[in-house]
Amino acid sequence: MRVTGIQLAMSDKPKKTNVEHALRMIDRAPQSDLILLPEVWPHIRLEAWRLFNRCRAHENLAFLISCNCAGANHNTKYAGHSMIVDPLGQVVAEGGEEEQFVTAEINPELVDTVRRDFPALRDRVLSCPFN
């Protein structure tokens, strides 16, 4: 999907801890500038959630905007900490454990600069011969 000149990849199905789902989404749109991920990670996995966001942004050399559940539901406390991460894996903005808006200004040209200076996507193999 292209929105005002930005190639966008978006997951419409939150999948708690499903890394393969995120990678399949990127495989369908390998040149995405911006990845949107709604998620439902529990608080007990907060540090894994924070690491996951930084890794997905950096390995795809794209901005990642994630929205995680906050608060509690049916005895499950959610991590919150929705975030915006740049293509180098640096957190640009991060929410807390409570429900809130997370905003930041991003420069879409950073994606092109990072991909030119660090062309790792060229070497990426999107399928595994052992599957």
Image (cartoon, rainbow, N blue to C red):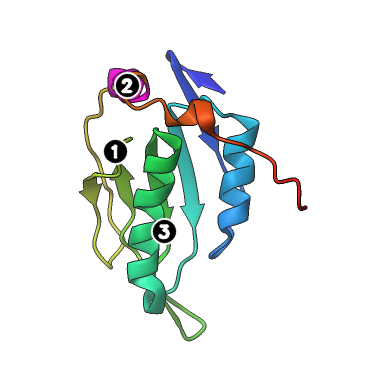
Question: Residue 8: in sight, yes or no?
Answer: no
Q: Which residue is pictured at 62% across the width and 51% down the height?
A: 21
In space, the residues marked 1 and 3 are separated at their CA atoms by 21 Å
Q: Is residue 71 left or right of residue 107?
A: right
Q: Which residue is pictured at 56% across the width and 56% down the height?
A: 19
> Pointers 1 and 2 in contact (CB under 8 A)?
no
Q: Which residue is pictured at 25% across the width and 56% down the height?
A: 95
Task: Answer few, some or many: residues within 10 Å of disc 1's Cα (few below 14, many 20 plus, some between 14 and 19).
Answer: many
Label 2 secondary element: loop
Q: Is residue 55 above or below residue 80?
A: above
The residue nearer to you, when weighing 94 against 48, is 48
Tell me which segment is drawn in magenta: 109-115
Q: Earlier in the sequence, mark 1 or mark 2?
A: 1
Q: Is residue 87 magenta?
A: no
- What residue would you read off at disc 3? 68
Q: Which residue is pictured at 24% across the width and 63% down the height?
A: 96
- What residue would you read off at disc 1? 88
Q: Is residue 54 left or right of residue 96?
A: right
- What residue would you read off at disc 2? 108
